[in-house]
Image (tube, helix red, strand yellow):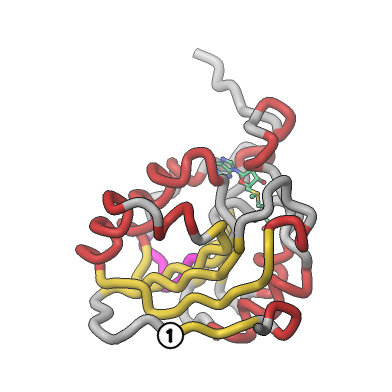
Amino acid sequence: MSMHIKTPTEQNPNDVVFTPAAWAADIVDFFKPYGLSLDPCRGGSVFFDALPEPKAWCEIAEGVDFFQFRDKVDWIVSNPPYSIFSKWLDHSLELADHIVYLIPVNKLLSSLQKLHKVYRFGGIAHIRYYGTGRDAGFPFGFPVGAVYLKRGHEGPVEISWYHEARP
Ligand SMILES: C[S@@+](CC[C@H](N)C(=O)[O-])C[C@H]1O[C@@H](n2cnc3c(N)ncnc32)[C@H](O)[C@@H]1O
């Protein structure tokens, strides 16, 4: 049986949006991942390039499917495909102790089901706001933040602001 790899144009267009390199660099600099890091959907590679060694990547457009990746990692850092975020979150929570996803925050905060999954894992340790989707050229105007999910987290949720997004 031949395997069909989805090209970016066959995917939901909202799933193939590329993060500004300055945002990705700030996220890595702010959260300082250590140990083995994974970018599960590297796209144009802005997160992967910014991550410290050792590091690994997946990208469906290059024939490497995140859902086939089964190794444990310390950190996952990226901007995931939003239309399949629920399934994506489930797989991420299985692989890593620390997960930082740049997402429209309502994707997580407006879903009790997803919040329950996250709080069974630990919790939200931090949300760093970057602006609206449109500020990054994404096709939506919802606020976008880097949400840090931490296994076993029991403390409060901290909030910080990228310099361009400060109130
Ligand atoms: C929102 S884009 C972000 C790309 C890049 N991480 C960035 O921040 O610029 C999501 C990426 O996920 C990729 N993708 C979708 N499904 C995937 C899968 N099952 N495994 C790996 N990558 C996938 C898409 O091709 C796309 O490049």
Is residue 37 left or right of 29 when viewed as pictured? left
State the residue in front, 39 or 79: 79
Q: Which residue is mark 1?
A: 158
Q: Is residue 29 above or below residue 75?
A: below
Is residue 104 left or right of 112 when viewed as pictured? right
- Residue 7 appears in which quarter of the rendering? top right
| Residue 56 appearing in the image | no
Residue at image coords 67%, 84%: 166
Q: Give the magenta range.
A: 72-76
State the residue in front, 12 or 74: 12
Q: Is mark 1 within 8 Å of ligand 1?
A: no
Question: Residue flagged by tag 1: what amino acid is it?
Answer: Glu
Residue at image coords 56%, 74%: 54
Q: Residue lying furthest front in this view? A: 167
Residue at image coords 55%, 70%: 146
Give the main secondary structure, helix, strand or loop, of the magenta stretch.
Answer: strand
